[in-house]
Amino acid sequence: MEQVAAGTISEPLDLVKLSLGERVFIKLRGDRTLTGNLHAYDAHMNLVLSQVEENIHIVDVGEDGTAAPPRIERRGFEMLFIRGDSVILVSPLLE
Amino acid sequence: MLFFSFFKTLTDQVITVELKNDLCITGTLKSVDQFLNIRLDGITVEDPERHPHMMAVKNCFIRGSVVRYVRMGARSVDTTLLEDATRRGEFMVRVLKGLRVD
């Protein structure tokens, strides 16, 4: 396995490892996204986040079948476990 | 294994389990197993009008695979310990696979 420099990314999960304790962006099934501080993960992508903000992206469909502009429902959680089978992607959030 | 141990530390605490069908169940965590199946006692359901069939249910077993989130109080979690355990878990996986350890 080629290393560019010590401590860099060689496996996909290394990116998640480097994000431990940092703020991350998570995309989930069901048009949900989360941002929060990552405290734990495993190979299933089960996660524990704190200071979480969840955005649910909803497109309402009118009676005539046309889509209204998408709206976002927001919720906040202080500590949250996320089951890995809902996770689509995990990305470091650079602020 | 990490999350199994994590949930074991949360036993007898009040947690809210949000299922993939949007049902939210709050109750006292009585036990958990390796599949992250969860047993809750003294449960209440958020928005009981939407889920009237749940009104008579006082305790339940939740299959791990139907869980979306588990919400808990920030005070019941030692985040430093959790991060260390995650790094250690990763380390053990690499050792077992015979991969480079750094």
Image (cartoon, coloured by chain):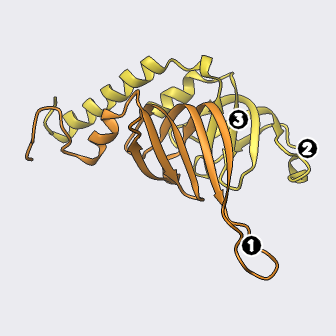
User: What amino acid type is highlighted by mark number 1?
Assistant: Val
Chain that the image shows in yellow: B
Compared across the picture, whether A94 is left or right of B14 comes to left
Which residue shows up at 18% across the image and 37% down it?
A8
Chain that the image shows in orange: A
- Residue B75's place in the image compared with B52, above or below, is above
- Residue B64's place in the image compared with A22, above or below, is below
State the residue position of label 3.
Answer: B16
Mark 3 is surrounded, within 10 Å at the Cα level, by few (under 14), some (14 to 19) or many (20 or more) other residues, namely many
Q: What chain is tagged by disc 1?
A: A
Mark yes or no: residue B72 visible. yes
- Work out whether disc 1 and disc 3 sit on a shared chain: no
State the residue position of label 2.
Answer: B56
Which residue shows up at 49% across the image and 27% down it?
B5
State the residue position of label 1.
Answer: A61
Please identify, in this view, whether the residue under mark 3 or under mark 2 is nearer the observer. Answer: 3
Which residue shows up at 58% across the image and 58% down it?
A31
Q: What chain is tagged by disc 2?
A: B
